[in-house]
């Protein structure tokens, strides 16, 4: 009998430690899975970790007949251990379809956060999982799917140069197409700020020199401009980083 420990990560999740054993992204999850397997009297499982997965596609999709895409599938007769439902499925319907496939192929699904074999593949004894715990777990799955969808949309919009809100960077304005474009007047002020900073002037002096009665500039604005330049690593006209 093969024992698999499975974890599914999206393209937007970052590893907390790239050198973590077996490549699992959360040390606490890793330890709890190992403890669960030891409690069952199993040897170390086969570690399966999938990253850069699109969470709009449920796990059950790869199990459907005729599916030709990529993605890991458990071997018939095996046991699969996951830390939580959100590491496997993307919703309640996906869970139901996945459980149906697992039972048909004699695969047991163990969920560590429930401390239970959820699929009841090889037993007639009903698995007892507190309903509140189950609902909370499914709620986290749904929240994750919504967050992943939002991150994907923002990522695509940002790649298209769209301004997604927040504080507009000084020197730019929002075009009617939603993209940031240079503001000629503020760009001239930016040039002055950089020149004065390269000459060693303080923030308050720079703010006073570039301000006009019509367009006053605070030292906080000057500070944000210079911090942004430093973050971007741009040199001054004299070749000194601001």
Image: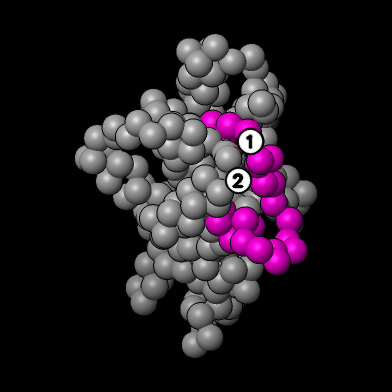
Residue sitting farthest toward the bottom: 176
Residue 183 lies in quadrant: bottom right
Q: Is residue 121 left or right of residue 12?
A: left
Q: Taken as a whole, is the magenta stretch helix, strand or loop?
A: loop
Work out whether 109 lies above or below 220: above
Give percent across and percent down for residue 111.
Answer: 45, 33
Left or right: 78, with 172 as reference point: right
The quadrant holding residue 57 is: bottom right
Q: Nearer the viewer, residue 81 or 9?
A: 81
Vertical position of residue 126 compared to residue 58: above or below? above
Q: Is residue 119 visible?
A: yes
Q: Earlier in the sequence, mark 1 or mark 2?
A: 1
Q: Which residue is mark 2?
A: 105
Q: Where is residue 124 drawn, in percent x and y?
A: 38, 34
Which secondary structure lies at badge 2?
A: loop
10 Å neighbourhood of mark 2: few (<14), some, or many (≥20)?
Answer: some
> Residue at coordinates 54% horizontally, 31% vertically from top-left?
81
Along the line of sight, which residue is nearer the eye, 207 or 81?
Answer: 81
Which residue is more in the foreground, 39 or 202? Answer: 39
Image position of 80 with respect to 199: above or below: above
Q: Circles 1 and 2: CB distance less than 8 Å? A: yes
Q: Can the viewer see residue 206?
A: no
Q: How many marks?
A: 2
Residue sticking out furthest to the front: 124
Q: Residue at x 52, y 45 (%)?
A: 103
Residue 8 located within the stretch drawn in magenta: no
Residues shaded magenta: 59-83
**Residue lying furthest left in this view?**
132
Residue 102: % across, % down = 55, 46
In screen coordinates, is 163 left or right of 140?
Answer: right
Would you name the residue on which mark 1 appears? Answer: 77
Q: Quadrant location of the N terminus? A: top right
């Amino acid at each position: 009998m093969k024992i698999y420990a499975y974890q599914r990560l999206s393209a937007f999740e970052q590893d907390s430690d790239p050198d973590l054993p077996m490549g699992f992204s959360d040390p606490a999850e890793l330890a709890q899975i190992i403890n669960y397997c030891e409690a069952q009297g199993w040897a170390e499982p086969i570690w399966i970790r999938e990253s850069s997965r699109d969470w709009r596609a449920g796990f059950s999709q790869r199990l459907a007949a005729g599916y030709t895409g990529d993605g890991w599938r458990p071997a018939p007769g095996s046991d699969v251990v996951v830390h939580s439902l959100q590491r496997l499925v993307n919703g309640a319907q996906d869970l139901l379809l996945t459980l149906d496939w697992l039972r048909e192929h004699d695969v047991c699904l163990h969920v560590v956060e429930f401390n239970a074999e959820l699929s009841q593949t090889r037993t007639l004894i009903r698995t007892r999982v507190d309903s509140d715990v189950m609902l909370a777990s499914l709620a986290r799955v749904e929240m994750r799917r919504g967050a992943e969808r939002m991150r994907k949309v923002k990522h695509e919009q940002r790649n298209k140069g769209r301004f997604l809100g927040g504080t507009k960077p000084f020197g730019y304005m929002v075009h009617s197409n939603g993209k940031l474009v240079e503001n000629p007047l503020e760009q001239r002020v930016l040039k002055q700020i950089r020149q004065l900073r390269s000459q060693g002037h303080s923030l308050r002096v720079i703010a006073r020199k570039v301000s006009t009665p019509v367009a006053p500039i605070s030292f906080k604005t000057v500070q944000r401009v210079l911090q942004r330049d430093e973050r971007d690593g741009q040199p001054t006209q004299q070749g000194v980083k601001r």
